[in-house]
Amino acid sequence: MRICFLARPNYDRLSAALFNKLKPMLGDDFSAGFITCNDDETAFIKNKTGSDTVYQSDVFLKEHWTEFCMEKLCEYEKKYDCAPMWKYIYTDRFLIFHDYDYAVRIACGMFMFCESIFSGGEYDYYYDEPLATLMSYVAYIVGKYYGVKYVCQMAGRTHGMTHHYLVTDPFQHNHFLYNGADVEYGEEELSKAEEFLKDFESKSIVKENAVFKTRKPRFEPVYVKLALLYHFNKKYKNKYDYINYRLDKQMWDRAKFYFRYRKMIRLCENTDYSEKFVYFPLHYQPEASTIVCAQMYEKQLFYIDSLAKSLPADTVLYVKEHYVLLGHKKLDFYRALSAYPNVRLISPWEDGKKLIQKAEAVVSLAGTPAWEAMLLGKPAFLSGKMYFDSAPGIINADVIYQNYLPLLKQWRKPERTDIIRYLCAYFRTLEKGHIYAAISSCYTDENITNLANSLLSEISRLEKEEKTI
């Protein structure tokens, strides 16, 4: 088994831990390489793994910088059949803040860099996080061209702190999820799914992010301290390390978010559960859920505009901000909502479950509330690609403008047994081990062992699956 690991924070630590666990398990049958962005990441990998097979992107980009140009990028666009190229550039949550010439050079450089790694046939698999940078997306595209398969272990939405599932495409789809009519489930599986659904129905929905906790923002002096430390760190002046380049400027954001939140919350209107409404929970941005999985509507105001113009006369649109890092959107976004007479910005602290239950429908790009609405038997529109887009009761709305009513009329409430069977299928795909690389519990010996074992078993299933095709 030959794996190339992404090794930038926090995946530098996770990739090193997986390598150290897999090496004694596989012995001479295992070899690995690591993709890093700078000297610090390379030093960390070499220190933790003893491996010298490290591909440092900033060194490569600096060496070849004068070769990167639009003509060369067009050649890659044609060779790898990835036109339009800007579609992929705009999936990068770092590169979108840079200018045209820099974006073109970096995109061209990423293709040349990944080609230098994967064209020689040294690897069978490329291990990464869910794709949300151009570096990762290009590695996926170039790797696929040369027969290198992308694999990602993704946190399970229902058991995020204990289990994960396998992803092999950019859209976080659950690779082994199959819910065909001919699949049989045992009594124990059906009982487990029923118990889970009953528990979900009986409790409040607790929003909990692995890194950021659910609490009202407050100003903390550490924001200023971190911003100053980042400002004087040469690491953020290195233009060849595009993910970290000028990132120091964003370190003031946490302080800005606090003051934005204070102003944003004043724009929120009261929730009136007596009126008919459609519920649209906003996404945190920039993240993979929008810039990759729902790129057409990544500008969420555009989506709100399309949806607001598509609702019946007696129905309003409730818009609720994402609870993580409140204030991350500029105030102009929230003020623009007031231009729509049938749109209400409601408090981010409103009860999400009650909103789902009282809504005429839940509309989401690629977010968990649509999954929750599906479990509760409510109409759930999904306008992006996500692992549950084939779940019973999910309404796939690639184009929402003027399509809300036609799609809603076609919706049929799924039978409870259909939801139970779907959960059975989903639970079958979950493997032990949580994948939140930013928190310390990921690195217990038990968790890393679980992740390593599941990676081996999932790759084995992948290979068996390919042989039967």
Image: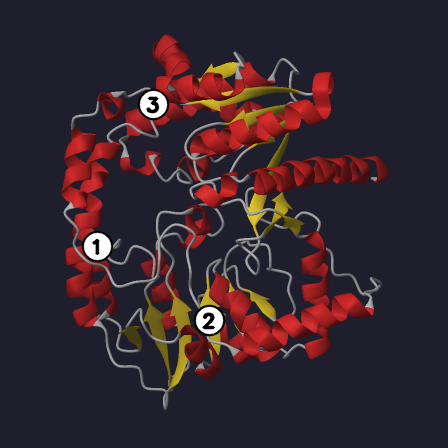
- Does 68 sit left or right of 53 as displayed? left
Q: Alpha-carbon neighbours of circle 3 within 10 Å: few (<14), some, or many (≥20)? A: many
Q: Which residue occupies the extreme top position in the image?
A: 63
Tell me the residue at 82%/62% (across/down).
Answer: 183
Secondary structure under the numbered disc 3 in the rendered image = loop
Q: Quadrant of the C terminus?
A: top right
- Circle 2 sits in a helix, a strand or a loop, which is it? loop
Residue 128's x, y, as percent?
Answer: 53, 34
Whether residue 281 is situated above or below residue 357 in the rendered picture: above
Nearer to the camera, 351 or 220: 220
N-terminal label among 2 and 1: 2
Which residue is located at x 48 percent, y 45 percent? 441
Type of amino acid at the residue the image marks with label 3? Asp
Location of residue 227 by image quarter? top left
Residue farthest bottom in this picture = 274
Answer yes or no: is residue 78 visible: yes
Vertical comparison of 270 with 169: above or below: below
Residue picked out by circle 2: 205
Instruction: Identify the residue shown where x is 19% and y is 36%.
Output: 249
Q: Which amino acid does the dot numbered 1 rest on?
A: Lys
Residue placed under numbered mark 3 in the picture = 241
* Dot 1 crowding, Cα within 10 Å, few <14, some 14–19, many 20+: few
* Gap in angstroms between the C-alphas marked 2 and 1: 27 Å
Front tag of 2 and 1: 2
Residue wearing tag 1: 330
Mark 2 surroundings: few (<14), some (14-19) or many (≥20) residues within 10 A: some
Can see residue 81? no
